[in-house]
Image: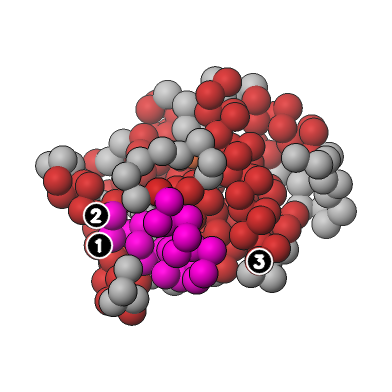
């Protein structure tokens, strides 16, 4: 993608400097994924009148903590006094909810909309700002994604961001149930908040 210049002082450095920081923590495949999420998030931001610099930063940082060892998350849950209930989950939940704290304290990104987009990118949330919805959807439909239904997800999201959120939430919950996986209670709250509002997805 074309080089974007950061001007809003959300991150104290250039986009390239942010990329370099992120690359230190991710294996090449994951690093490529976050750049595709950025690209998709910026497009969705453009289409939905959302700040493109925030979309770029949130897209790049959403999986910043994905490849950290469990001990880092457990330490952060204690250090930052997060809900102790989180200790009963694992990387899939931690890299968002706890990962946001690592982005804040290690990368010095304090924008709460960006941090919430990171926090909620796997579980969704009852309330999601347009930026949060964008990161949630960009992660799901970025061009490297290939699963049954991804094209429909892309089409729905292009028409209506909220409908995309409902679509993904429904499919994620169905997948967890189908595979006998534990459902994080907030995922059910997300389902109840979003899916009945869009009866056609
Ligand atoms: Fe993730
Ligand atoms: Fe991701």
Residue 124, located in which quarter of the rendered image?
A: bottom left
Q: Earlier in the sequence, mark 2 or mark 1?
A: 2
Q: Which mark is residue 188?
A: 1
Q: Earlier in the sequence, mark 3 or mark 2?
A: 3
Direction from residue 108 to residue 162 in the image, left or right: left
Q: Which mark is residue 173?
A: 2
Asked whether residue 97 is in view, the answer is no
Label 3 CA crowd tier, 10 Å (few <14, some 14–19, many 20+)? few
Direction from residue 185 to residue 126 in the image, left or right: right
Q: Nearer the viewer, mark 3 or mark 2?
A: 3
Residue 200 appears at what percent x and percent y?
A: 31, 74
From the image, give the main secondary structure of the stretch colored magenta: helix
Could you tell me if the residues under marks 2 and 1 are in contact, i.e. CB atoms within 8 Å?
yes
Is residue 165 on the magenta stretch?
Answer: yes
Residue 33 appears at what percent x and percent y?
A: 55, 34
Which residue is label 3 attached to?
Answer: 47
Q: Earlier in the sequence, mark 3 or mark 1?
A: 3
Q: Which residues are magenta?
A: 151-171
Residue 201 appears at what percent x and percent y?
A: 32, 68
Secondary-structure class at tag 2: helix
Callout count: 3
Q: Is mark 1 within 8 Å of ligand 1?
A: no
Which of these two is toward me, 39 or 191? 39
**Vertically, is 167 above or below 60?**
below
Which residue is painted at 47% across and 60% down in the image? 155
Which residue is painted at 81% across and 42% down in the image? 2
Secondary-structure class at tag 3: helix
Label 1 CA crowd tier, 10 Å (few <14, some 14–19, many 20+)? some
Is residue 90 on the magenta stretch?
Answer: no
Which residue is painted at 15% across and 49% down in the image? 177
Q: CA distance from mark 3 to mark 1?
A: 29 Å
């Amino acid at each position: 993608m074309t080089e974007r210049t950061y001007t809003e002082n959300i991150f104290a450095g250039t986009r390239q400097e942010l990329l370099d920081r992120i690359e230190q923590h991710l294996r090449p495949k994951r690093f490529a994924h976050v750049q595709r999420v950025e690209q998709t998030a910026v497009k969705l931001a453009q289409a939905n009148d959302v700040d493109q610099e925030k979309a770029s930063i949130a897209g790049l940082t959403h999986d910043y903590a994905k490849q950290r060892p469990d001990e880092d998350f457990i330490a952060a849950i204690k250090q930052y006094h997060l809900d102790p209930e989180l200790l009963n989950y694992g990387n899939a939940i931690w890299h968002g909810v706890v990962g946001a704290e690592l982005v804040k304290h290690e990368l010095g990104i304090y924008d709460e909309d960006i941090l919430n987009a990171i926090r909620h990118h796997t579980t969704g949330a009852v309330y999601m700002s347009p930026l949060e919805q964008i990161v949630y959807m960009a992660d799901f439909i970025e061009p490297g994604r290939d699963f049954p239904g991804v094209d429909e997800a892309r089409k729905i999201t292009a028409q209506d961001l909220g409908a995309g959120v409902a679509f993904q939430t429904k499919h994620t919950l169905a997948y967890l149930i189908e595979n006998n996986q534990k459902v994080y209670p907030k995922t059910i709250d997300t389902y109840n908040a979003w899916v009945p509002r869009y009866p056609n997805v």
